[in-house]
Image (spheres, rainbow, N blue to C red):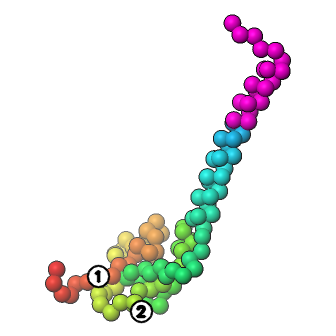
């Protein structure tokens, strides 16, 4: 059997404690990085909500992304509400960006 004196036992316990602290620190850094990446700004980008009603600009509360309507960027298709009965705002569970779509019923398929 192996016997450890007090100094060796303390050193072994300290290594275990430092290992646990290292794992915690790494986990903390990963989570903090994920939060920072998720919350970055949109400088230089336009997020277009395809099918959004005219003149609607909004910020998605879940992602923090700013959206603009698509009409200034496209000259074909029609905006359609997914379902007035089940869509936004009647259904608060359905996110606003999913309430309307742009459809292209004209032309060849």
x and y percentages locating residue 21 in the rendered image: 72, 40
- Disc 1 packing (10 Å; few <14; some 14–19; many ≥20): some
x and y percentages locating residue 108 in the rendered image: 16, 84
* Residue 103: mark in rendering: 1
* Nearer to me, 40 or 65: 40
- 57 over 98 or under it: above or below: below
Disc 2 target residue = 72
- 83 over 31 or under it: above or below: below
- 102 over 25 or under it: above or below: below
User: Which element is circle 2 on?
Assistant: helix
Which residue is at 77% across, 30% downward? 14
What is the quadrant of the C terminus in the image?
bottom left
x and y percentages locating residue 55 in the rendered image: 47, 91
Which residue is at 59% across, 58% downward? 34
Which residue is at 51% across, 85% downward? 57
User: How far apart, in angstroms, are the residues tagged by discs 2 and 1?
Assistant: 16 Å
């Amino acid at each position: 059997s192996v016997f450890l004196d007090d100094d060796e036992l303390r050193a072994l316990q300290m290594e275990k404690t430092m290992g646990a602290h290292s794992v915690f620190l790494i986990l903390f850094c990963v989570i903090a990085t994920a939060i920072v990446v998720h919350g970055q700004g949109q400088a230089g980008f336009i997020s277009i909500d395809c099918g959004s009603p005219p003149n609607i600009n909004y910020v998605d509360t879940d992602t923090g992304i700013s959206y603009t309507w698509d009409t200034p960027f496209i000259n074909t298709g029609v905006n359609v509400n997914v379902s007035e009965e089940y869509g936004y705002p009647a259904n608060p569970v359905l996110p606003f960006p999913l309430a309307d779509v742009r459809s292209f019923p004209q032309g060849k398929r």
